[in-house]
Amino acid sequence: MGEATQTISDLIQSKLDDLTRAERQLALSVLQNYPASGLGTLTALAQNAGVSVPTVARMVQKLGYKGYPEFQAALREELKAKVKTPIAKHETWAEAAPSEHILNRFTDAVIENIRLTLSQIDPDAFDQACRLIGDETRHLYIVGGRITHTLAEYLFMHMQVIRPNLTHVQTTSNTWPHYLLNVQEGDVIVVFDVRRYENNTLKLAEMADKRGAKIVLLTDQWRSPVHQLAHICLSNRIVVPSAWDSATTIMLLVETMISAIQSLNWEATKERVENLEDMFDQTKLFRKFT
Amino acid sequence: MGEATQTISDLIQSKLDDLTRAERQLALSVLQNYPASGLGTLTALAQNAGVSVPTVARMVQKLGYKGYPEFQAALREELKAKVKTPIAKHETWAEAAPSEHILNRFTDAVIENIRLTLSQIDPDAFDQACRLIGDETRHLYIVGGRITHTLAEYLFMHMQVIRPNLTHVQTTSNTWPHYLLNVQEGDVIVVFDVRRYENNTLKLAEMADKRGAKIVLLTDQWRSPVHQLAHICLSNRIVVPSAWDSATTIMLLVETMISAIQSLNWEATKERVENLEDMFDQTKLFRKFT
DNA sequence: ACAGTTGTGAAAAATTTATCACAAGCAGAG
DNA sequence: CTCTGCTTGTGATAAATTTTTCACAACTGT
């Protein structure tokens, strides 16, 4: 754990003096494009560095590894650790709690989920989704299932402020077909569906698809069956140390979308927000923010 | 953004639809820690992904490579190329998007919020809150406001599975006093309140406090006025580049609490979850998870 | 019941690694 | 200049590992 994290690169440099001429040449070649060159075959590395095969074998052992495969494994481990975000190195999140405390374990998992989700997202698809959802000329339907209806509602609540002409549909209610009676060509449906995927949601998507609506799907890494109908599919990592899946990553994506859409058409949104604030002031529902 | 270089990661994602279940599982495992996992042996990769050796061989060929070694060589080439570029430090979350893209800016802000929130949380207070909320001998009330009612509902939904004897209250409804008629000494009230703080919520908290209930408050960094009545106060950072505040950090905390509470009394929870699954199976509301 | 997918166990093929003996090369000492 | 000790490459080979493929049975969802 708390070791002085010596990379293999460091190790090689520190031993550079103990190496012979050909070995040094090899070592420098390894460092030259690190760590890729060390991950090929021994023979390839030898050729690449311009030294002989036995020289490679000898040096690797001098470095303290039992053989070339062991050296490679170490390189791979290092690569794996390196790719994990610099943030992840951050010792613990709640410093007052031990690293095995659920606060730290859970947060680790969520950060990792965020990292993976974001690294796999296509910004163009994301932008396109935002434009669709923000387009006031299209009616907007927001659909959530048993678990996801809170996310759907959260999006709905904010979109209500940003634009008119939208409907919130819950697939867990039996009345959802009524809402979809008026779906037209070009309308937009935002569907939330994570495992276990709901039959109702799939049916709804099929119906909307037949009517020519564009479907934006927010789902998990295994992707709801709806994704075959979806114009845009944004998938999220959701696995955490819990009996349930995590909605945090999806929440992040939803909020990011809200922020992006809002700035697409800020002039109109601004006015709507101000009106809303006025109305709240009048109803005295909220305290003045201090 | 029609970049000439398609990464292998991109390739895998684009072919994701043509892959079968096991192959997809494998593909996701490769992506999970990319590219390190693809640089080990075929056998190791198979084991790591939980699929069989032939599955790996089959998928690699589906991706268009002649064999596993060729696939590895491609990965190494990509790694080599990536390290060479001056902007090798991928300080962005969505690497395909520029760092000023909202996806990266927003995520940066949320991660920072999480970091600050967690670093300021008192693990003992957190644990104590979990014990209170998980204590079946106390009636549990969960209270959300206009913005936060989705969070409250999310917590409520999961707590419903974990334990009996709980009530969901929305302060935006006029009927909330009815729910609180029966509050007794020792009952627990979880209150969500972020700016702009709601008068109704404060009134509700005062009433509950008079009746001897213990209040657990989830609020923002400026803390709702309810905090003077609260037994435990967990405050969150919520500022993001948007016209609204972020609920993601609070969502993280809520999910962590759910995970912690669930494991406090796993035996009982387990049974309740299984019963619930049975009921879902019978109603055929959900598809079998594949 | 069917078509497609997946894992198993095995074995063959291919590749890679590790070594060896030996000769060539090189540098410094005498 | 020659001797000496050390390093290095060569080519070969044995050992180990890895890759590839196969047939078949079990399983999946439709």
Image (spheres, coloured by chain):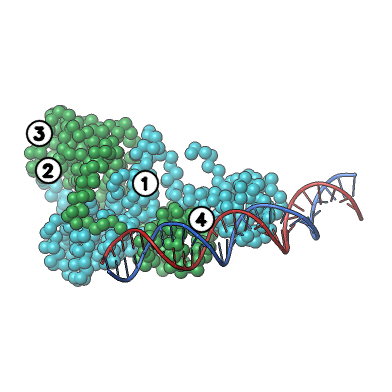
Chain colours: A cyan, B green, C blue, D red
Q: Which residue is mark 2?
A: A284
| Subunit that carries the residue with mark 1 | A
Identify whether B153 is placed above or below A203.
Answer: above
Spatial separation of the CA atoms under disc 1 and disc 2: 41 Å
Q: Looking at the image, which residue is at 44% across and 49% down?
A: A84
Measuring from the top left, give residue C10's x and y in whole percent. Answer: 50, 60
Q: CA distance from mark 1 to mark 3?
A: 39 Å
Q: Amino acid at mark 4?
A: Gly
| Secondary structure at numbered mark 1 | helix
Disc 1 to disc 4, how far (Cα)?
A: 24 Å
Picture residue at 46% right of the left edge, 51% below the top: A83
Can you say whether B240 is above or below B230 in the image? below
Disc 3 marks which residue? B182
| Subunit under mark 3 | B
Q: Where the C terminus of chain A falls, by quadrant?
A: top left
Identity, as a three-letter code, of the amino acid under mark 3: Asn
**Tags 1 and 2 both on a single chain:** yes
Is disc 4 on the same chain as disc 2? no
Badge number at residue A109: 1
Residue A130 falls in which quadrant of the image?
bottom left
For badge 2, the amino acid type reads Lys
Q: Position of residue A185 (x, y in %)?
A: 19, 71
Q: Which mark is residue B40?
A: 4
Q: Disc 3 on helix, strand or loop?
A: loop
Task: Residue A12 in the image: state x and y as whole percent.
Answer: 62, 48
Q: Chain of mark 4?
A: B
